[in-house]
Image (cartoon, rainbow, N blue to C red):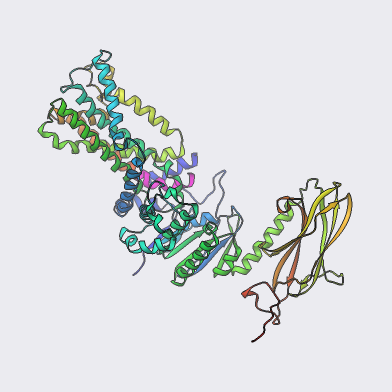
Amino acid sequence: MIYGSYDILSDFIGIASKTDKLRQGEFWAVDDVSFELKKGDIFGVIGPNGSGKSTILKMLNGIYMPDRGKIEIRGRVGALIEIGAGFHPMLTGRENVYINGAILGMSKKEIDAKYDQIVAFSDIGDFINAPVKHYSSGMYVRLGFSVAVHCEPDILLVDEVLAVGDAQFYNKCTNKINEIRNRGTTIVLVSHNMWLIQTMCDRVLLLGQGKTVKIDTPFNCIQEYANIRSIESQQSRHQEKLLPVTVEHAEVRDRAGSPMKEAMPDGALVVTAKYLCQTDQFQGFFFLRVTTSDGYPLYTSYSEPSTFHIGEGFVDAFIPSFSLLAGEYRIWIGVCGEKKEEARISEKQLKLDVLSSTDYPDPRYGIFFNQVRWSRK
Amino acid sequence: MEKKLVIYEPNKHVIAGWRFVWKQLFAELRSSWNLGFRLFLRDFTSKYKQSLLGLSWVMLLPLFTVLVFVIMNRSGILNIRNTGVPYPVYALFSISLWSLFTGLTASISGIVGQTGGLITKINFPRIALIQSPVLTSIIDLLIRFVLLFIVMIYYRTTPHAEAFLLPLTLLPLLLLSIGIGMFLSIIGAVFKDIPNIINIFLTVAMFITPVMYPLPESGFLHAMNLYNPLYYFIEVPRNLFFMGTFQHLPAFALFCLVSVAVFFMGWRFYYVAMNRIVEKV
């Protein structure tokens, strides 16, 4: 409060404040981050929560002013950040399109010209003339998104907004964003969806506690991010309460029983785990999950319901064919209670790489490997 | 077409200097008019869309306040004389002007609090938020004047010829309200009790300022109000409208300048402080 008042006062009077030194209690939300984007670049920003991603977007949007350094932007900036900004529930969809459009910087002429496209894209139909308070949340989002996306800025800032809406709408959005990108719009994308980052972005900035960790290709940054996260989660695992069953040790082995770190796409493997049970008659399941290196789940399997007795035990999970093409994967094996995913009790994470080979399809076109039989008629 | 280069850097307002900031203020005003008007239409149409009494609400509160004062005056609780025109007409005129001040100040000072979410997420000319309350207050005033004219017809009171100058004499009041409102909207974003303080202050001010009664001949209220800009901003238009006289010219002129200064300072403050406030809201 005091710092704020002081800053406002010195700005108002016209005295320069020493913004590049931290006062007590302050910290750098974004510390020495620099990058340059050319027209048409698609730039991803990833990092843990609180690493400064949204702050960077707000600076690019002209809402927060930098305290040190400079930002130069050439072109109109649009944002897919607050969908439906300025919407008033009592007014009709049509009236709200004009308000939202005006807030996003479109002139009345521009909105008039694009009005039909906006309504068509949003799939609202006749409801466009009904008050917005009658809209479902999906319709609300579609309309807001449609206005924002037709704003046609030179630079588009996107912040996690594609998490809303159904799958069909999601596809529409990604198609539209591709369209925008082909038109040469520069896009800055903040997301936790590594798939989106991987497929859309040319370059990615990985942030950690406000600082640049890496600016590199999407794949490298995502790898680095996964590494950081697994180190952090290992550290937090030191606190383990008294669990009914603990998985003490787990390993990936081949059919012969020897440990393996690499597999072929259609290789067979056994995941074996040793567990310790401290609560007699505990009812639960074993579960096995295979995910990508950044945690995106690929497949899960549950054992038959089991009763656990006090003491040690071993369990094997036999996978006849791993079914995944070249890449780095994680295998989780663990124990969950009767409610399965809602009651995960203990688990161990293992790494498994699948080697690349020209005998198998390119993983860029799909990471799953399936034996498909072809026959010509 | 060459796109404009926008630069964000620390202390940009300070580096630019006062002169440049004024230029930016006026440029922002011009470019934001479209949005400001849209927001006004939105606020105005939505306010009365689902209400029973609709636009007549604008008239009802002043009407009932005046009614209370008239009843108290008639029954001897208050002893208001020498108003020149029938008291109901006098009171209604005064309260319409006073409502312009209170309504505008209160609504502008609440702006940052109300639109907090919008301000921190989207970049748009912030001055557009001020235009809606201003236009709304002016429309409210016009509606109340319609009521006033009806009452004047009933009491066979006619305004003086010089009454057409009325809008000009209301300008200082308007500027003062907007200026104070803009200061308070920023301060109110940090100190949350400001709206309450404003309410109390405005209520007290309505009784201490000679709004519903003429200036006392002597005494504390007499002395105090000679230094009260609001007294002149109500009294001068009132005299002009009903009597055709223009009194207190020196004091009025001085406080006009004060209003203009408050307005421009408030405008600069609103524009410059907004950058800091978005980090706090």
Q: Residue at x 65, y 64 (%)?
A: A224
Q: Residue at x 32, y 26 (%)?
A: B205
Q: Main secondary structure of the magenta part?
A: helix
The stretch drawn in magenta includes residue B270: yes
Q: Is residue A254 above or below residue B8?
A: below
Image x and y of residue A217, in percent: 59, 70
Q: Is residue B195 left or right of residue A330?
A: left
Would you identify the image quadrant in which residue B71 lies? top left
Q: Which residues are magenta?
A: B268-281
Q: Residue furthest left?
A: B161
- Tell whether position B131 is magenta: no
| Picture coordinates of residue A318, whole percent (x, y) | 81, 67
User: In which quadrant of the rendered view does residue B180 lie?
Assistant: top left
Up-down: is A107 above or below B150? below
Could one spot residue B247 in this view of the protein? no
Horizontally, residue A368 falls left or right of residue B265, namely right
Return the x and y of residue A222 as percentages of the image width and height. 63, 65
For the residue pair A58 and A287, the one nearer the viewer reads as A287
State the quadrant of the N terminus of chain B: bottom left
Give above or below for B126 relative to A373.
above
Residue at left offset 48%, top offset 44%: B280
Residue at the extreme front of the image, as rendered: A377
Residue closest to the eye, A26 or A169? A169
Q: Does the image show residue B68?
A: yes
Q: Position of residue B61 (x, y in %)?
A: 31, 29
- Report the residue that reaches farthest toward the right: A311
